[in-house]
């Protein structure tokens, strides 16, 4: 992998306070990707002007405006517009660490036939800098065997801003599901884990800027990754079904706890229904958990977050 084989796609919507920082983090890389493609998904703040100015100042930056159609459409548009074999994604409020491209190329040298490359990341939050759990050995660099099972044990394995995939592979699995606003990224990661070869490096290469926990509200939409795989579970082998069920149930538990804290009854009901289809015994646990006060889940959430403090 040469840097000239890599492009970066940024989907942009109302990020006037962070888009400059995100782009600067790419421009400061020791190894420069061939191009940066900014897809402006109908921003209504000053993001458009900032992005257009960046494009006029840097020949490697391509700016494209489209009416607001959602993040999946924007990401797919960026993938379509790229002319490189490998494509990285970066959310407009996150940043690459200065070693991102070096770590990516080193991982490629170690595993040159992966479909998707994942790099470790950290999160800047109201609690401090967090290091998400990854269920792999410290300093791991290589192929992730049993990706879905490994992912279910630690969600720090993959994030939109910390991946690079082969263009042919993301197109083969259908890209990001358009029209979906909740779980669309998890759907892609699970599809990739089922159909491709994934490599990971434990070198922290990205910093995410996480919103305050209390400001995050569950979307009213159904979690697409859950609904899709529950519906299509029978299309996979028994081993794959087992791994998917374990991942989905754990993810449902986390989403349900968040919905309980936020008093989102509709979302809780939706998640219970999916859990029932996956595991009656795990559904019963979820049902009984309704008797517990919300403050228990707040304490568990805060404990879980603080365990990740670096």
Image (cartoon, grey):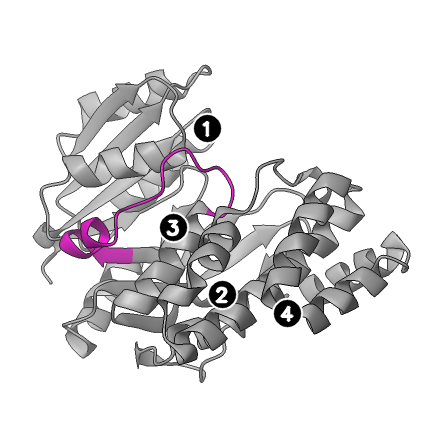
* Precedes in sequence: disc 2 or disc 1: 1
The percent coordinates of residue 295 (x first, y second) are: 88, 55
Q: What residue did someone put label 3 on?
A: 161
Task: Select label 2 or label 1 by which is in front.
Answer: 2
Q: Is residue 272 left or right of residue 296?
A: left
Above-or-below relation of 143 to 72: below
Pointer 4: what residue? 279
The crowd level at tag 4 (other Cα within 10 Å; few <14, some 14-19, many 20+) is few
Q: CA distance from mark 2 to mark 3?
A: 12 Å
Q: Secondary structure at mark 1?
A: loop
Residue 206 lies in what quarter of the image? bottom left
Which is closer to the viewer, label 4 or label 1? Answer: 4
Label 2: element kind: helix
Q: Earlier in the sequence, mark 2 or mark 4?
A: 2
Q: Is residue 187 above or below residue 304?
A: above
- Image location of residue 46, percent across then percent down: 43, 16
Q: Secondary structure at mark 3?
A: helix
Image mark for residue 156: 2
Q: Which residues are magenta?
A: 164-183
User: Which residue is pictured at 37% across the width and 39% down the height?
Assistant: 22
How far is disc 1 from disc 3 in space, using C-alphas? 15 Å
Q: Earlier in the sequence, mark 1 or mark 3?
A: 1
Residue at 44% in and 64% down: 233
In primary-sequence order, the first of circles 4 and 1 is 1
The residue lying toward the viewer, choosing from 20 and 272, is 272
Q: Quadrant location of residue 162? A: bottom left
Evaluate whether residue 264 shows in this view: no
* Viewer-nearest residue: 92 or 53: 92
User: Whole-Å distance between the Cαs marked 3 and 4?
Assistant: 32 Å
Disc 1: CA contacts within 10 A as few (<14), some (14-19) or many (>=20):
many
Where does label 1 land, which residue?
15
Dot 3 crowding, Cα within 10 Å, few <14, some 14–19, many 20+: many
């Amino acid at each position: 992998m040469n840097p000239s084989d890599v492009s970066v796609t940024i989907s942009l919507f109302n990020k006037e306070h962070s888009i400059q920082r995100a782009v600067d983090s790419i421009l400061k890389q020791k190894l420069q990707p061939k191009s940066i493609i900014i897809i402006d998904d109908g921003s209504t703040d000053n993001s458009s002007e900032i992005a257009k100015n960046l494009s006029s100042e840097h020949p490697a930056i391509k700016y494209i405006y489209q009416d607001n159609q959602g993040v999946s459409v924007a990401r797919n548009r960026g993938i379509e517009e790229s002319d490189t074999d490998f494509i990285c994604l970066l959310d407009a409020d996150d940043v690459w660490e200065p070693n991102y491209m070096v770590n990516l190329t080193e991982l490629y040298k170690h595993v040159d036939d992966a479909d998707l490359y994942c790099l470790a990341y950290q999160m800047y939050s109201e609690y401090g800098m967090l290091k998400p759990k990854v269920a792999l050995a410290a300093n791991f660099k290589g192929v992730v065997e049993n990706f879905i099972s490994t992912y279910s044990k630690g969600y720090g394995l993959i994030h939109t801003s910390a991946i690079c995939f082969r263009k042919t592979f993301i197109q083969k699995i259908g890209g990001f599901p358009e029209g979906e606003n909740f779980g669309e990224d998890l759907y892609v990661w699970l599809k990739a884990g089922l159909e491709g070869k994934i490599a990971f490096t434990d070198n922290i290469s990205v910093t995410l800027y996480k919103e305050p926990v209390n400001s995050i509200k569950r979307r009213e939409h159904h979690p697409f990754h859950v609904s899709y795989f529950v519906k299509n579970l029978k299309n996979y082998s028994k081993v794959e079904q087992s791994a998917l069920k374990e991942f989905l149930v754990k993810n449902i538990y986390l989403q349900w706890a968040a919905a309980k804290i936020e008093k989102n009854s509709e979302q809780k009901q939706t998640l219970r229904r999916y859990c029932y289809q996956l595991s009656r015994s795990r559904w019963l646990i979820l049902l009984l958990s309704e008797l517990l006060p919300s403050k228990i889940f707040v304490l568990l959430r805060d404990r879980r977050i603080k365990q990740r403090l670096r």
